[in-house]
Amino acid sequence: MDNTFRRIIRYFFSGTVFIVPLVATAYFIFISFSWLDSLLMLPYPGLGFAIILVAITGFGYLTTNFAFKTLSDWLDHGMNKIPLVKLIYSAVKDLLGAFVGDKKKFNKPVLVRINKDNNLYQIGFITQNDLSELGLEDMVVVYFPHSYAFSGYHYFVPRENIKPLNVSGPVAMKFIVSGGVSGFKDH
């Protein structure tokens, strides 16, 4: 009887590990679609999401066009002139640019020795390679994301403590954010 109860509990937790992420993802997508549809007051579920997806893709296409790029640069310059708006606008733009676009910042994963005495290492991403403006030619800036959070720390690290990793940025980020549980497989 005791063995049967343990097996049932093990099956329950195995089912939980399979079902909970699936349901959470489906719920998030459903809530997102519903919220977008309610904003646009559309009668068909998912139509708001489709319209926004097409609009963003259209703006993306236009920003690669020379004439619109000039307008985009002018708007960007103007937004960076307004004190409070500049703070929010530039922070959001830099954050998005770090993940997507031509100026990705989380594409250089490195292993950093953080404690020589105890031989401790941490994985991070080089975000600034040239610190000559600060007189720190022998250092780089490394960002260390937190596990299971949308935050992290950045440190100035001597180049001698850095070892480049032979994995892609997304795989390294997934490894860090999962607390090392995901491993280094790209799937």
Image (cartoon, rainbow, N blue to C red):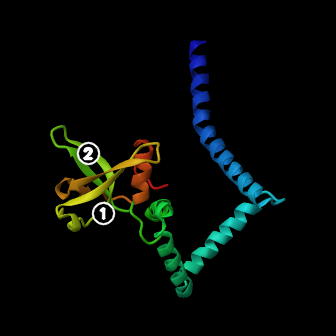
Residue 91 has which mark?
A: none
Image quadrant holding the N terminus, namely: top right
Where residue 184 sits: x, y (%)? Answer: 40, 51
Q: Dot 2: what SS?
A: strand
Dots 2 and 1: beta carbons under 8 Å?
no
Percent from the top left, x then y, of residue 67? Answer: 55, 87
User: Residue, x 46% and y 60% (percent of image)?
Assistant: 87
Question: What distance separates the C-alpha of mark 2 from that of mark 1?
Answer: 20 Å
* Rendered image quadrant of residue 22: top right
Please identify the residue farthest to the right as the structure is shown: 43
Residue drawn 74% across the image and 62% down it: 48
SS label for mark 1:
strand
Decide: is 91 above or below 174.
below
Amino acid type, label 2? Tyr
Q: How many marks?
A: 2
Is residue 62 in sight in this rendering?
yes
* Badge 2: residue crowd in 10 Å (few <14, some 14–19, many ≥20): some
Q: For the point 40% across and 45% down, which residue is it?
A: 146
Quadrant in the rendering for residue 38: bottom right
Residue 183 makes an appearance in the image: no
Residue marked by disc 1: 128
- Residue closest to the far top: 1
Nearest to the eye among marks 2 and 1: give it: 1
Q: Is residue 124 left or right of residue 56?
A: left
Q: How would you rate the neighbour count of disc 1 (Cα within 10 Å): few for under 14, some for 14-19, many for 20 or more? A: few
Of residues 18 and 92, the one drawn nearer to the viewer in this rendering = 92
Could you say which is closer to the camera, residue 26 or residue 11? 26
Pointer 2 residue: 121
Where's residue 7, x and y in %? 58, 23
Lower sequence index among marks 2 and 1: 2
What amino acid is found at the position of numbered circle 1 in the picture?
Gln
